[in-house]
Image (cartoon, rainbow, N blue to C red):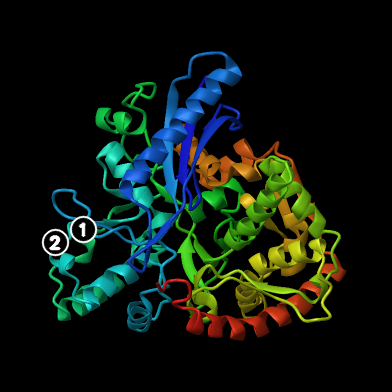
Amino acid sequence: MRTYLGIELGSTRIKAVLIDESYAPIASGEFGWENQFENGVWTYSLDEVWRGLQASVADLIGNYQTTHQTPFPTVSGMGISAMMHGYLVFGKAGNQLVPFRTWRNTITEQAATELTDLFGFNIPQRWSIAHLYHAVLGGEAHIGEIDFVTTLAGYVHEQLTGQRVIGIGDASGIFPIDSTTNDYHDNMVAQFDTRSARHGAAFKLRNVLPKVLNAGDPAGTLTADGAKLLDPTGTLTAGIPLCPPEGDAGTGMVATNSVAARTGNVSAGTSVFAMLVLEKALSKLYPEIDMVTTPTGKPVAMVHCNNCTSDLDAWVRLFGEAMGALGMNPSATELYGALYGAALTGDKDSGGLVACNYLSGEHLTGFHEGRPLFARTPDSAFTLPNFMRTLLFSAMATLKIGMDILVDGEGVTLEKMLGHGGLFKTPVVGQTLMAGALNIPVAVMESAGEGGAWGIALLASYAVQKGADETLEAFLADRVFSGYTVTSIQPDPADVVGFASYLTRYRALLEVERAAVTYLTNYGKEG
């Protein structure tokens, strides 16, 4: 039996998925983790990266052996995926020069604005190049020591294989990609080198960035040292071929079979983003819209929001604590199922309640920091169903603001959006409300809960099995998804109207949010 291993380092969990020759998951393992806000920066420690990787792989192996009552099988191929963007920078000795600055940081506004103006191409604050230029502008001491800059997936892949490479989808969140060459954009590289040199930077950009690879390209094999890093027990052995490391956006596209033109998907977890594969370029630059690529280099319009379920999850945990105080201990599945299910019975406009879910900054609406808020008027219908519907609506509101730019401003049309990620693990609820929010049918595959770990496992199988001229699009359509069940929910007109009413309140609440960021900055930190 051939098996393929996919591992994705997401923002709240590291997940490992093993698939078989039918591309179905046969075992999984995971490790929960959280980013830390240290010295004004959202970060994860690299020690926690490896602790989490080892724990998720150990959990996978144990679950497989328990379920199948057989030894863990030989792995025919594997791949690493992780949250995109951010700033991981190293010196010549492989030493980390500054703590990992993740995608969640909104500290690079000046750098991102200057590069956007220089390139005539939108550079979001979370992109790696914005973080690098931010360090250059700030004259940070480590600039003179830089040997290489990479993403989290690129870092882990290099430690496992010794290969300093990156998948093109992940690369498109480092620096703009030229889809005619499937490489970093030459003219923009030259422009960056000239501009950064004026500020005293001696490095050349191409010398410090990983090499760009397409889906299916060979990307090295697991070394003996890499195998020990990943699995100290020795169950995984050296020699396993790896596919190019990818970002969570690319694996999300693969996991939803959304890599062909005019397809789209929405990934909803700690962050939420919608990916629309374009037939042609947008008519102009939109600061709110990112231009990235599929794992094969096709242009993609991306609406990315830093905040989605973090505030929602915090409220669910609080309800769980309340139930625990009464001697009830529901499982996470039961708790989420009951609370999410209640939202479907709420008023269509959530009864006049409103919440802002900004735990961190949100570039799309112009926030450097966030303060989660809940508000209601004296005559609001303050019920549990309305409260839960409000929290779910708040997780979708900023995405809707960005999607309106593409739908209303560019006339982009989609037959449906494929949903995946944690929001869709509870059946029907997130799918129904998202369809109403976006006014687009939302489909979910039976594999939706597996998400990007399954997506990178599919990319690993493609790299090993693909025919000489077999495209990724054909591989996914003909081999992987031909027998998969897809459940699609049409938008309910009443839900569309109800969410529109909610969004009006949400936009008004953003002014309160701005005041909260200003006046609650140091609250609770004195003394």
Q: Nearer the viewer, residue 229 or 205?
A: 229
Say whether residue 87 is left or right of residue 331: left
Q: Which type of secondary structure does the marked residue at label 2 adopt?
A: helix
Identify residue for label 1: 97
Spot occupied by residue 296 in the image (x, y as percentages of width and height): 46, 53
Say whether residue 347 is left or right of residue 301: right
Residue at far top of view:
70
So how many labels did they put on this image?
2
Q: Which type of secondary structure does the marked residue at label 1 adopt?
A: loop
Q: Nearer the viewer, mark 1 or mark 2?
A: 1
Q: Is residue 333 visible?
A: yes
Residue type, mark 2 in image = Glu
Q: Is residue 467 visible?
A: no
Spot occupied by residue 234 in the image (x, y as percentages of width and height): 34, 21
Residue name at image x 62 percent, y 50 percent:
422
Residue type, mark 1 in image = Leu
Mark 2 crowd level (few <14, some 14–19, many ≥20, 10 Å Cα)? some
Q: Nearer the viewer, residue 347 or 421?
A: 347
Q: Nearer the viewer, residue 243 or 129?
A: 129
Say whether residue 412 is left or right of residue 297: right
Mark 1–mark 2 distance (CA, rounded to whole Å) = 8 Å
The disc placed on residue 145 is 2
Residue name at image x 25 percent, y 77 percent:
191
Spot occupied by residue 288 in the image (x, y as percentages of width and height): 52, 77
